[in-house]
């Protein structure tokens, strides 16, 4: 069969198009020269929610120290100088209480300063709670749970951040590759449209060939526009997450990692999610904290017992009764018990804390149901992504075979140039679908790890 000039030209152009697609698109697309973990660490150091969680952990540690301090004695010192504006009136103590050796020994109390004008004084006080009705133990338990809650919240923020970085990082990889592919395809279709137009003018090709070429070019131009927008969005998101300027991101060749399929059963995965996911741990701790708050409120209905030791020193300055200043010391030990018999406010607080505890228990059950459902969905979603990726790889192999067959048939003259071109573009489209399926698989694996408690 004799070939037309158009046939000879397409025999040269189409292999170049196929070779270009094979060179620029593979299952190992380019990625940022910044490794994924580097991007993730940069994002973790810049993310406001992560920084807030870390500050919350530091504050929880301080509250834990405060709770521990309630079990320790408290000590305080004081010192002062008392000076009267004028000399106090003299008191004849003997007329009041009978003969007394010194006025300052009235009742054995050195705090009576008459008839002295100026004095120094100092005291030391040590107090220790003996029984608080369990309030201090409850406060300590609440402080410990608060620290764990903040740590789990930080873990939750990190797992969500990993998904965000995964979407942006591998989104840049895939969309940049697809953008380069579509641009190359459009350039080749533009050249083909020009050549076909010339052949139509010369009568060597039909208007149908030109129309098909234009339709294909319009289709790939639309893909290019959507891919360029997606790439720009991924770059902006990655720059926002990591704090790295978008224009400084450089790319080298690397591959999107292929995760291993889950080996556990759905029941094992569900149990791990219920026991290990941050939301589940936070909900359990919140329910326990509500129980401890009720215990702390109820402690206010019980007696409170404390002990204290006090010592006091006083010095009379310019004592007219003595030739030199005189220091006096006094001390005491006290055991104090108090009990508020009627306090409706504390009863109301105790009842309210009990109802709050019941609400937290209901929240815990709701969280467990949600986590079980999400774990099942994540397991099924990952299986579906694996199947989709495998199907895309099989489709790519089939598209390659179809394109190779089309090239052979074109050389033998049994199909037209347009049919061969459509087969080659079908192979390129299959490569794009395989890349996107691999991206979806990476995102599904990140979500699976978060929703099943692996992170």
Image (spheres, rainbow, N blue to C red):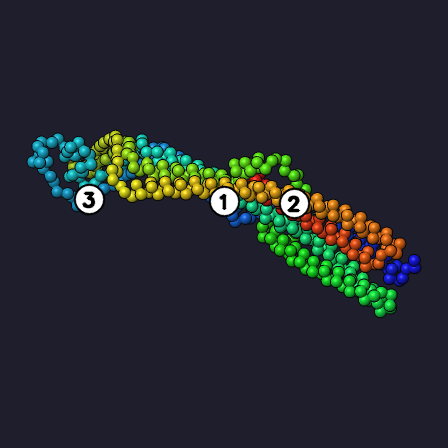
- For the residue carrying disc 2, how many other residues have a C-alpha within 10 Å: few (<14), some (14-19), or many (20+)? many
* Drawn side of residue 98 relative to residue 176, left or right: left
**What residue sits right under mark 1 in the picture?**
53
Check the picture and name the quadrant holding the C terminus: top right
Front residue of this view, candidates 181 and 403: 403
Label 2 SS: helix
Residue 434 lies left or right of residue 408; in this view the side is left
Q: Position of residue 144 (x, y in %)?
A: 44, 36
Residue at mark 2: 385
In this rendered view, identify the residue nearer to me: 48 or 389: 389
Secondary structure at numbered mark 3? loop
**Residue depicted at 84% across the width and 58% down the height:** 416
Whichever of labels 2 and 3 marks the residue nearer the N terminus, that label is 3
- Disc 1 crowd rating (10 Å Cα; few below 14, some 14-19, many 20+) is many
Which quadrant of the figure contains the N terminus?
bottom right
Relative height, residue 333 to residue 28 (above, below): above
How far apart marks 2 and 1 lie (CA) works out to: 33 Å
Numbered-mark total: 3
Horizontal and vertical percent position of residue 295? 36, 36
Q: What numbered label is drawn on residue 18?
A: none
Nearest to N terminus: mark 3 or mark 1: 1
């Amino acid at each position: 069969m004799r070939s037309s000039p158009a046939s000879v030209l397409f025999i040269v152009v189409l292999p170049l198009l196929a070779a270009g697609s094979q060179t620029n698109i593979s299952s190992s697309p380019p990625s940022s020269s910044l490794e994924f973990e580097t991007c993730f660490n940069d994002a973790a150091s810049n993310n406001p929610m992560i920084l807030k969680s870390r500050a919350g952990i530091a504050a929880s540690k301080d509250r834990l120290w405060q709770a521990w301090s309630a079990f320790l004695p408290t000590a305080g010192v004081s010192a002062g100088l008392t000076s009267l504006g004028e000399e106090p009136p003299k008191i004849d103590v003997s007329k009041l209480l009978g003969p007394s050796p010194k006025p300052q020994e009235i009742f054995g109390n050195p705090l009576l300063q008459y008839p002295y004008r100026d004095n120094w004084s100092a005291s030391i006080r040590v107090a220790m709670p003996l029984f608080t009705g369990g309030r201090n133990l409850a406060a300590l338990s609440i402080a410990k749970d608060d620290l764990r809650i903040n740590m789990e919240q930080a873990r939750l923020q990190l797992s969500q951040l990993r998904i965000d970085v995964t979407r942006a990082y591998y989104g840049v990889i895939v969309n940049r590759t697809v953008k380069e592919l579509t641009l190359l395809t459009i350039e080749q279709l533009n050249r083909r449209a020009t050549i076909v137009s010339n052949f139509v003018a010369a009568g060597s090709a039909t208007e149908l060939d030109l129309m098909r070429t234009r339709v294909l070019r319009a289709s790939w131009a639309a893909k290019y526009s959507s891919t360029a927008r997606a790439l720009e969005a991924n770059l902006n998101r990655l720059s926002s997450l990591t704090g790295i300027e978008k224009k400084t991101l450089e790319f080298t060749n690397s591959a999107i990692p292929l995760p291993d399929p889950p080996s556990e059963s759905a029941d094992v995965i569900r149990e791990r999610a219920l026991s290990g996911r941050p939301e589940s741990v936070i909900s359990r701790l919140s329910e326990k904290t509500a129980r401890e708050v009720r215990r702390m409120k109820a402690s206010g209905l019980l007696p409170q017992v404390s002990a204290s030791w006090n010592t006091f020193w006083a010095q009379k300055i310019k004592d007219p009764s003595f030739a030199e200043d005189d220091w006096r010391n006094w001390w005491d030990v006290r055991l104090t018990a108090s009990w508020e018999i009627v306090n409706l406010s504390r009863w109301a607080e105790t009842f309210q804390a009990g109802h709050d505890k019941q609400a937290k228990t209901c929240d815990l059950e709701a969280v467990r149901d949600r986590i079980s459902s999400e774990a099942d969905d994540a397991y099924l979603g990952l299986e579906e992504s694996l199947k989709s990726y495998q199907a895309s790889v099989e489709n790519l192999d089939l598209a390659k075979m179809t394109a190779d067959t089309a090239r052979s048939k074109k050389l033998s003259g049994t199909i037209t140039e347009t049919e061969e071109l459509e087969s080659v573009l079908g192979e390129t489209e299959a490569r794009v679908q395989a890349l996107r399926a691999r991206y979806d698989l990476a995102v599904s694996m990140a979500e699976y790890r978060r929703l099943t408690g692996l992170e």
